[in-house]
Image (cartoon, grey):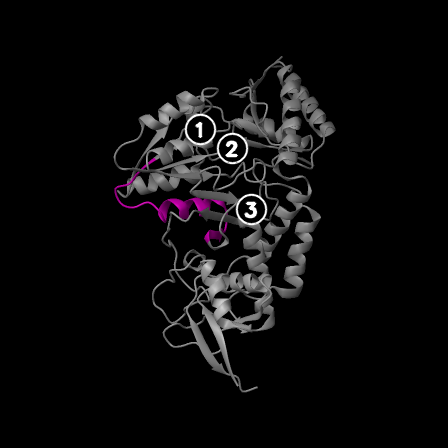
């Protein structure tokens, strides 16, 4: 199954976004980026259960810096 | 031992601080931001909670709230991360070496220049004029202490911030003696760079401090390394707080610092702490004022100070503190790492004995302390 997530370079930004979404009733989980690219290295991934575009709008309206979205094929 | 050296560090620490640190050490002291496992993620959340707590206490942005090892570390970041070659800085005549020495070093190596504006006790307008008179076309920053660590003198920081901003300058504050005792808000107080210790008025443990800064400033790193983010980049990450927080942070200490702030809030906030400490200090002032041979340095007849300095004529300050130690009182004697302030206020020859009551001291302890000072003065025949 493909899962889309929002990437953050810092844990602080990811945690800010997670709490913002949860305050707005959007369920989500912050994890380390499961598939970091070789340019970025370690980063964070916010897995959103629901409308990721709405989540992105909220995050951007709060001026929380992010690295865009990415799809992840969850093999579990 | 009756502890009256709270300006150096508050002691004892509240039980909630010790418990929070022990819980962290026992249950989740993994490396925050350095792993995907549940303990690291829990540590990361605790770090974020603490950052939010600290930022909220001072009205700052958590992203621009940087944990440091102490207030001196934060001041070094504020000065060396912001100032550029050719900049000019104005500081006060009451600065601690935490401000004076980094600037002296930067001046010596040709990076910046700075001037010292004389603080005139009881005359804010003259103090402001002295700061204004130091300005030149290279001036970029006014940086000063909020409260003198020797005399308890409070500087007119809101007026100084307004003076700085009116002239297009930044305003930075060393809140070593005031954070947790005087209410401070970055926005309303006009503070661009705020440096705080964790282990004094905020009741946290040693090894903690913070630099908080406004959106109009982008300090560069003065130390680079691992941040747990963008690890494949050679360059230090641009995003705060990671840009300024290289290396593993002191998580148990930071958790303790957050617990200290929660304690402070539950105890009634800065106002309650300040009121009690000022009451104890004023009680002490009255008692010492009737002991012959004791000279106090109450420069502004300040009823709000939460520390005081004195000497006993004919007895060195070090001997005075040692004798008080044998009587069961912990006070600090000497020059208190503030050469500039002693030179400015005429105490550079003798130094002072500093007494700084804290939230946990009692009036009875202060009375007993005054009695011991009287005994020492009498035994040394200075009466």
- Label 3 Cα neighbours within 10 Å, binned few <14 / some 14-19 / many ≥20: many
State the residue lying farthest toward the right. B364
The magenta span reads B64-89
Q: Cβ–Cβ below 8 Å for labels 2 and 3?
A: no
**What is the CA distance from the residue labelled 2 to the residue labelled 3?**
16 Å
Q: Nearer the viewer, residue B192 or B11?
A: B192
Labels 3 and 1: the sequence-earlier one: 3
- Residue B252 is left or right of residue B218, and the answer is right
- Give the residue at mark 3: B198
Q: Cβ–Cβ below 8 Å for labels 1 and 2?
A: yes
Say if residue B358 shows up in the picture. Answer: no
Q: Position of residue A21 (x, y in %)?
A: 55, 64
- Give the residue at mark 1: B341
- Give the residue at mark 2: B149
Q: Where is residue B340 in the image (x, y as percent from the top left)?
A: 41, 30
- Label 2 Cα neighbours within 10 Å, binned few <14 / some 14-19 / many ≥20: many
Q: Where is residue B287 in the image (x, y as percent from the top left)?
A: 66, 19
Q: How many marks?
A: 3
Q: Residue at x 40, y 62 (%)?
A: B225
Of circles 3 and 1, which is in front?
3
- Residue B142 is left or right of residue B286, and the answer is left
């Amino acid at each position: 199954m493909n899962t889309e997530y929002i990437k953050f370079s810092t844990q602080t930004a990811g945690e800010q976004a997670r709490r913002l979404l949860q305050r707005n009733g959007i369920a989500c989980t912050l994890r380390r980026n499961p598939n970091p690219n070789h340019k970025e290295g370690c980063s964070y991934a916010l897995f959103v259960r629901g409308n990721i575009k709405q989540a992105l709008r909220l995050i951007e309206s709060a001026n929380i810096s992010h690295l865009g979205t990415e799809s992840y094929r969850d093999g579990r | 031992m009756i502890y009256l050296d709270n300006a150096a560090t508050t002691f004892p620490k509240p039980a909630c601080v010790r418990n929070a640190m022990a819980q962290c050490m026992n249950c989740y002291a993994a490396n925050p931001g350095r792993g995907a496992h549940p303990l690291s993620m829990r540590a990361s959340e605790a770090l974020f909670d603490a950052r939010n707590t600290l930022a909220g206490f001072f009205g700052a942005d958590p992203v621009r709230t940087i944990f440091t090892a102490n207030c001196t570390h934060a001041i070094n970041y504020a000065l060396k991360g912001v100032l550029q070659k050719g900049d000019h800085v104005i500081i006060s005549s009451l600065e601690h070496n935490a401000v004076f020495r980094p600037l002296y070093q930067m001046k010596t190596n040709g990076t910046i220049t700075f001037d010292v504006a004389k603080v005139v006790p009881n005359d804010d307008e003259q103090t402001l004029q002295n700061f204004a008179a130091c300005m030149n076309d290279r001036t970029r920053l006014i940086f000063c202490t909020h409260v003198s660590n020797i005399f308890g003198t409070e500087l007119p920081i809101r007026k100084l911030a307004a003076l700085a901003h009116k002239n297009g300058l930044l305003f930075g504050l060393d809140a070593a003696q005031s954070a947790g005792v005087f209410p401070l808000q970055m926005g309303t107080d006009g503070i661009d760079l705020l440096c705080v210790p964790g282990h004094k008025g905020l009741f946290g443990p040693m090894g903690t401090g913070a630099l908080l800064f406004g959106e109009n400033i982008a300090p560069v790193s003065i130390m680079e390394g691992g941040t747990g983010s963008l690890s494949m980049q050679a360059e230090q990450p641009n995003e705060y707080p990671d840009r300024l927080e290289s290396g593993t942070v002191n998580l148990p200490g930071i958790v303790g610092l957050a617990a200290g702030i929660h304690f402070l809030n539950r105890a009634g906030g800065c106002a309650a702490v300040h009121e009690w400490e000022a009451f104890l200090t004023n009680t002490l002032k009255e008692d010492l004022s009737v002991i012959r041979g004791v000279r106090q340095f109450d420069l502004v007849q300040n009823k709000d100070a939460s520390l005081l300095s004195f000497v006993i004529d004919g007895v060195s300050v070090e001997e005075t503190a040692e004798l008080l130690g044998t009587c069961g009182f912990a006070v600090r004697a000497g020059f208190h790492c503030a050469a500039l302030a002693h030179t400015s206020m005429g105490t550079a020859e003798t130094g002072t004995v500093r007494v700084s009551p804290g939230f946990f001291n009692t009036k009875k302890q202060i009375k007993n302390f005054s009695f011991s000072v009287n005994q020492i003065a009498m035994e040394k025949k200075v009466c």
